[in-house]
Image (spheres, rainbow, N blue to C red):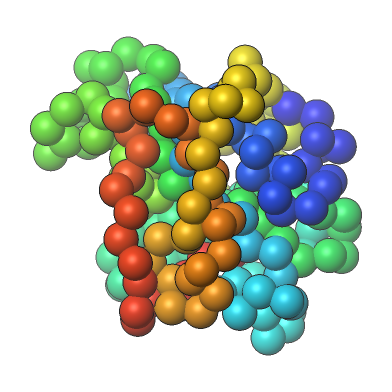
Amino acid sequence: MDRSALAVDVLPAARRLLGCVLEADTPDGTVAVRLVEVEAYRGRDDPASHCYRGRTPRNAVMFGPPGHLYVYFVYGMHFCANVSCLSDGEPGAVLLRAGELLTDPGVARERRPTARRDADLARGPARLAALLGLRRADDGTDVTDPASRVRLRAGTPVAPELVRTGPRVGVAAAAELPWRHWVDGSPAVSPYRAGTRRRRSA
C-alpha cells in the first residue's frame, strides 16, 4: 500500500483501510485478513487517544511517519495494533478491530484453536493481533514495505453503501464520536459495547 494513502486525516484513513489486506509471516505460515472494522483516533484533540497528553516513548509511532504499526498491551494480557496516519509529526492512528480470513484456515486454526467459527478468528482487535502474531516487538513496523514481516496491501475498495459508522467501542472519553467504521453484513464485525472504564487505543 502506498504511504501517501495514509498521510491523511484519521477519518478518511479509516475509510481507506476497510477492504485492505493485512498479512503477516508467522511461524505457522503466512496469515492474511481483509480488514472489515476499524476505529479512528486523531491525537491531541481526542481524549480517548494514547497521544492526547503528548508524545512519550510508548506512543511515539503515532506521531509518524504514516504507515507504521503502533502496538500496545491492554488488560495485562492482550496486544492490539493500529496503523499510523496523518503527516509526519501529526499524531493519529487507526485501530485495526476485525478482519475476514483470506488464507489457509488450517494455519489460522493452529494459531487460534479456541475460535468456534472462522468468523471469530480475527473478530476483535486482540484476536486479530493474536492471529497475526503481533507483539510489542512489531511496534514501529513499516507496513508499506513489501519486505516487512507484516504488510498492508491495498484491497478492493468497499462500496460506499456498505460502509457503516458508529461510536467507538470500550472507550469512556469521547465515546459518542462515530469514528468506528465497518463493512455492513460482515460476520467478523464485533458487537457494539459501550465503554465506561477502559482508556483505549491510538
Of 110 and 167, nearer the camera is 167
- Left or right placement of residue 130 versus residue 37 in this view: left
Of 104 and 178, nearer the camera is 178
Residue at figure coordinates x 79%, y 53% from the top left: 9
Tell me where residue 130 sits by quadrant: top left
Could you tell me residue 114's position as x and y percent?
A: 12, 39
- Left or right placement of residue 45 versus residue 80 in this view: right
Residue at figure coordinates x 73%, y 27% from the top left: 1
* Quadrant in the picture for the C terminus: bottom right
Figure label count: 0
Q: Is residue 5 visible?
A: yes
Could you tell me residue 30's position as x and y percent?
A: 44, 22
Of 163 and 36, nearer the camera is 163
Tell me where residue 89 sits by quadrant: bottom right
**Which residue lies most toward the bottom here?**
53
Placement of 26 over or under 61, stated as above or below? above
Placement of 54 over or under 141, stated as above or below? below
Placement of 72 over or under 49, stated as above or below? above
Tell me where residue 108 sits by quadrant: top left
Could you tell me residue 117's position as x and y percent?
A: 17, 27
Could you tell me residue 157's position as x and y percent?
A: 64, 20
Q: Is residue 136 visible?
A: no
Placement of 120 over or under 191, stated as above or below? above
Residue at figure coordinates x 32%, y 45% from the top left: 190
- Left or right placement of residue 188 versus residue 42 in this view: left
Residue at figure coordinates x 31%, y 72% from the top left: 76
